[in-house]
Amino acid sequence: MDQQSFDVFVVGGGPSGATAAEDLARAGHSVAMLDRDGRIKPCGGAVPPRMIRDFDIPDSQIVARIQTARMVSPTGRTVDIPIENGFVGMVDREHFDEFLRVRAAQSGACRLTGTFVRIERTRHATIVVWRDKETGEERRSPTRMVIGADGARSVVARAEVRGGREIPYVIAYHEIISAPETGPGYDPTRCDVIYDGRISPDFYGWVFPHGSQASVGMGTGIDGIDLKKATADLREASGLAGCTTIRREGAPIPLRPLDCWDNGLDVVLAGDAAGVVAPSSGEGIYYAMAGGRAAATAAQARLASGRVRDLALARKMFMKEHGTVFKVLRTMQDAYYKSDERRERFVSLCHDVDVQKLTFEAYMNKKLVQARPVAHLRIGVKNVAHLLGLVPPAWT
């Protein structure tokens, strides 16, 4: 690959990088997609119907369809929220990410396996230096543009983009297990979200069905937490301790979008590298793919116009579409995740039918529901009452 030049060189082959590479290749650009072989990101795997529609995800990639979300409070109280007029799809990242990479390659992207080293610039060219996994040798690929889609601790972001070294994150850890056919604490059509400081003092734990398998895990931003022990405790509490463990994975998950996604010259970020994981929920797959599409759009504009300011379109487009949702979710996380007493109130608030309906309508369509002002008012009043401690946690 030495000296083979590309219009765009995409660093990272997860959902954001693969989406960007596919979009650019379909638009007729020469694209390289560099990915480390064999890495699987820890992820609950939940995807909304909008993502399935927008990115043409086939049924074969949906390993489970979730009909109910169960919220579990620190005291063990549960609230089952039915998912009306739709479902939450589940994917297994081991197979889903590879499907996206293969689809990008079939669209014309040149698939490379190795690790990013650095970007060099000459008077006339931008050159991506990367290490070939098979040979161990450094390769050099001239390109007009670089998309950094290489995760929460993005090497591209840290080297090239302002603020790329300071992005805050939590550590997520999960275990993929063989799912039981039946069990008192497990339902293959239900996602369990556990808000319990004994599992995670500042985030949550989860049990997400994946068909014949399940993802059991947790996240935290606090140093010193034993993630494996917390997950073992969660498995024990969920009746899943005896299930066969298939694989274990851990990785950083960013907490907020970066203020800048480009270097004002030839690099733009996408996905976790840009920090686009939803606060509160930690949802990242849909937003990674949306961010990859936005980065591809900005790259195409930059290639067509020659204007470096067009790179800023990626963040502008994404935040115009999703910025308000991110702000609401960040406010909710800051308000309710700080203590078990607050988490108890949060789960209690989830009893409210208005909360349930508006939450899942927003989740499935990826936009805030504007058509129910009275419901928003009722939720706001109850929310303030809980945060001020004016009502007991059991109030619904």
Image (cartoon, rainbow, N blue to C red):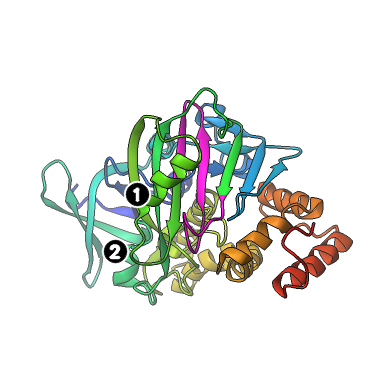
Q: Nearer the viewer, residue 379 or 48?
A: 379
Residue most extreme to the right? 374
Residue 77 versus residue 262 in the image, above or below: above
**155, 364: nearer the viewer:** 364
Q: Position of residue 246 (x, y in %)?
A: 34, 32
Q: Are marks 2 and 1 in contact (CB under 8 Å)?
A: no
Bin the neighbour count of mark 1 within 10 Å (Cα to Cα): few under 14, some 14-19, many 20 and up: some
In this view, the residue in front, 293 or 280, is 280
Establish if 79 lies above or below 94. below
Q: Which residue is pictured at 45% across the width and 34% down the height?
A: 240
CA gap, disc 2 to disc 1?
27 Å
- Name the residue located 72 percent from the left edge and 40 percent from the top edge: 82
Q: Where is residue 263 shown, x and y percent of the image?
A: 38, 73
Label 1: state its secondary structure. Answer: helix
Q: Residue furthest top?
A: 181
Q: Is residue 65 left or right of residue 155?
A: right
- Range of magenta residues: 194-216
Query: Hey, what amino acid is under mark 1?
Result: Lys
Residue at mark 2:
155
Q: Quadrant of the C terminus?
A: bottom right
Residue found at x 61% / y 44%: 48
Residue 228 shows which numbered tag?
1
Q: Which of labels 2 and 1 is toward the front?
A: 1
- Secondary structure at badge 2 equals helix
Please name the amino acid that badge 2 sits on.
Val
The image quarter in which residue 174 lies: top left
Image coordinates of residue 317 in percent, x first then y, are 58, 64
- Is-magenta flag for residue 396? no
| 10 Å crowding of disc 2: few (<14), some (14-19), many (20+) | many
Residue depicted at x 56% and y 31%: 64
